[in-house]
Amino acid sequence: MFPAIDQEKTAQILGRMAAISTERDLLTEIIKLSGCYYDRLSASASFGVWAPRLKPEQKLILNIACPAGTAGEYILHKYELPRLASAFEIGRGFFAVVLQGLAPFSGWNKGALYFYTFPERDLVPDIYAFYQPFGVDGPSAVIDQQSYLWRSVQSGRQIPVSITKLHIGTASPAGDFQGLQDELAANKYFAAVDALEFLPIGAFPGRNGWRLECGAERLRLTKTSAQKPLNWGYDGGPAFILSVSEAYGLPDRLKALVDALKLRGIKVGLDIQLNHFGPEGVYQNYYFPEYIARTQTEWGPRPNFQNIYARRFMLDKLREFCLLYRPDYLRLDMSSRYGDDQFVAEICHMLADLPVILEDERPEKWLTAPDGAGALARWSFPAVHDLQKLRAGELAVLPVLLTKLTSAADSVIFAGSHDEQGNNEACPVTDRLTPALAVMANGLEMSWYCFSWFHFFCNYREDIQLVMVTAEKSGVIGHYPAELWPKMTALQAYFQDFQTAREFYNFIHQLWRAEVAPYRDDPAKCRYNVQVWLNNNEMLVALCLAFNQMIYELANIRNMVAAPDYVDYLIGLKKLRKANPWLHRAACCYNIDNEQKTLTLLSQDEQTGKAIKLSCVLGDDCSHCLSDCLCFD
């Protein structure tokens, strides 16, 4: 039994499209039908391909691979796709067919695969496939997107307050969607998380341990190793805009993870990379060569956003991706490299109910202005650069940095991300000061869910030469350096270096006595801003609380007492911020009770002047505390 063409449904699709009277409406329908869409009620699948580069006399062949019964063996069924007869040129490049009797893909040797044969190449995957189970150069999978039943409810526009960014492959021992979902209940960190943001999860290139042999009638897939593609995720991007990486699991597993997070009250953010194509798995030229621009970014060629057709495909398929997986917000990777600012604005306005965060180093305010691009926020590069200077010991940047942190309502403030950890070997693993400063910023705070080195890693084909200094230095190309990413439950070891904390306290103490205290009455002679030191709560909180939180007095800056484990302190701050997104940190005072294991925040209502007291319980396993007491008098 092999899949049969449903002649009636195929004719209905082509007839309906032939009757469309405007090019704009026809393009909308072409984009909507491009890809493979499975209907579980009729056990059928529609296949749509827009390949305007094919000449009228050229044929396009659809290959359906169905399991043969023997492990890894697939029988190939070939179908010449009928071409749309349209009054518009763009329509004459569209092909469509509906097949009956298909089983959707659910794993190796389970369900149907498909690919196309173009005049120049036998095996071309679908660039709008939902899943590439055997790599970006392998066949695409027929996916049932109707099978998952959501338990969470979409509740309108959700604004993240505190973001935790992570890489699916390194966030759990399993390194996939299911592994992270299992961690939610086992790891206390997630109780405090307001929003989780994933590094790109789309299909990306890499060696995957599969050997593919394609003949005239058979397709054979042999597993040669347990290897799977490894990548930060930024080398996939627009090549397979709807696809989920095979390294992380089936599309339904992503839906289940998003569902589980939302049921726990955790917002979900997706990092979307649209600014360049990677070194492998780029098949756009077979379909529509103008899809790829002639200009390059520093990472590879960019999509041709100047072309109206490429632009519309990208926008509409991005919206489809969001409807399928229900993120609460998007982060656009390096939007400054799109080469088209209007396209950035179109994404933000198209996704009106979905906040968009930009990674954009330009200072233009229009990016976040409602009458401009309309983004929710953008990454604050000036602040993170000063935080990096602070890490290097340049305390003189603190006053300037403080101003940036407290006036960054439309910015994402962070001390470290995949870039800082991966591209800066000087970034200290046990740094406490800069994360605390970022947590207390007035804008969106972001932390990085990886408290050890995060070198760049990938495992492209051996014939692809990488020109990346970080990859060469790290020496981790082609494998996971498992020792670099401990489980979060073992993080205690990274925050028990109390000798470092004491040294830091002593350094601040000496700096105060030598450089600040003598000039209280004559601030002009001081190299540092005495008023900032004396009167700005936020800097004092950052300096004093960064290493294990402390009690302090605003009037005379006394009694700095170290407190419980840093991880519990960070979780406590995140809990309070998650529950009270209106908080302004410049008017807050923090207090740790070591015995009761509570974190208390004291603030004041700006309108009524009434005191506000908020508390949360720290982790139950706080077993390491400091009892040092220093006085800055």
Image (tube, rainbow, N blue to C red):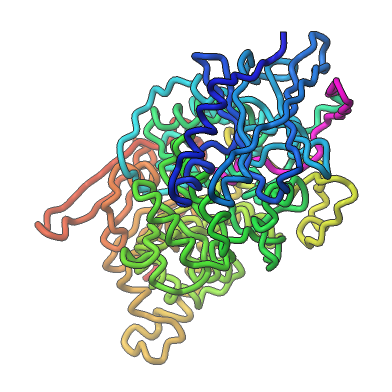
Q: In this view, does 19 lie to the left or right of 279?
A: left
Relative to the observer, which residue lies in front, 95 or 290? 95
Whether residue 619 appears in magenta in the rendering, the answer is no
Whether residue 314 is situated above or below residue 381 in the rendered picture: above
Residue at (69% x, 33% y) in the render: 132
**Residue lying farthest to the left in this orientation:** 608
Q: Which residue is drawn at 83% across and 41% down?
A: 121
Foreground residue, 309 or 331?
A: 309
Side (left or right) of 455 relative to 49: right
Q: What stretch is highlighted in magenta?
A: 198-221
Q: Quadrant of the N terminus?
A: top right
Q: Where is residue 95 in the image (x, y as percent from the top left)?
A: 63, 37
Q: Residue at x 47, y 81 (%)?
A: 515
Above/below status of 448 relative to 111: below
Q: In this view, does 356 lie above or below 250?
A: below
Quarter that holds the C terminus? bottom left
Q: Does the magenta stretch include residue 203?
A: yes
Q: In front: 589, or 626? A: 589
Closer-to-camera residue (376/110): 110
Q: In the rendering, at what x and y percent does residue 162 appear?
A: 41, 49
